[in-house]
Amino acid sequence: MTNKKPTKKMNYEAIKELLANANRPDLIDFCDHEIELLDNRNSAERKPTATQIANADHKTAIVAYLANVAVAKTVTDLIKEVDGFADFSNQKVSALCNALAKDGKIQRAVVGRKTYFADNAVTIDKKDKE
């Protein structure tokens, strides 16, 4: 048994079971309605934030740059060479690149203690980087 805190939906489901034994269909309907509202709230289409839109543009720039140079680059290289990235921190560019790699749009390779990112068409030669 885990010590996981029950969610609102789990609580309403448990209340429905108790109310079924108490023969209270009006309150069961109320619980069903509340569960439906929770489901709708969780699955609602949300507009992306301004930061998410900007990050999508930055990701597009990274993919385009890596496709053009056809060479594996580090995050520091990307900051120096991609237009508009001069003010970005290593952490921000690394997070963008890791998200792209997770989505399969670019590849990520760790050679020694350095992480390289490249277009999917590029072969990252581990011997050249060491």
Image: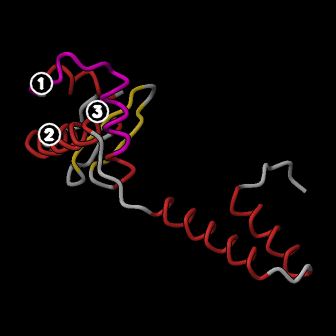
Question: What whole-number distance in Å separates the C-alpha atoms at marks 1 and 3?
Answer: 29 Å
Mark 2 residue type: Ala
Residue that carries the numbered disc 1 in the rendered image: 84
Q: Position of residue 116 (x, y in %)?
A: 32, 34
Q: Earlier in the sequence, mark 1 or mark 3?
A: 1
Image vertical order of residue 33 relative to residue 50, above or below: below
Q: Mark number for residue 37?
A: none
Question: What whole-number distance in Å separates the C-alpha atoms at marks 3 and 2?
Answer: 26 Å
Queried whether the magenta region covers residue 87, the answer comes back as yes
Residue count near mark 1 (Cα–Cα under 10 Å), binned few <14, some 14–19, many ≥20: few
Q: Are marks 2 and 1 in contact (CB under 8 Å)?
A: yes
Residue count near mark 2 (Cα–Cα under 10 Å), binned few <14, some 14–19, many ≥20: some
Q: Is residue 20 left or right of residue 65?
A: right
Frontmost of labels 3 and 2 is: 2
Q: Position of residue 63 (x, y in %)?
A: 18, 45
Q: Quadrant of the C terminus?
A: top left
**In front: 58, or 119?**
58
Queried whether the magenta region covers residue 96, the answer comes back as yes
Q: Which residues are magenta?
A: 83-99
Q: Mark number for residue 61?
A: 2
Residue that carries the numbered disc 3 in the rendered image: 128
Mark 3 residue type: Asp
Q: Earlier in the sequence, mark 2 or mark 1?
A: 2
Q: Secondary structure at mark 1?
A: loop
**In front: 54, or 101?**
54
Q: Residue at x 17, y 23 (%)?
A: 85
Question: What whole-number distance in Å separates the C-alpha atoms at marks 2 and 1?
Answer: 9 Å
Q: Residue at x 33, y 55 (%)?
A: 104
Q: Quadrant of residue 52?
A: top left
Q: Residue at x 13, y 28 (%)?
A: 82
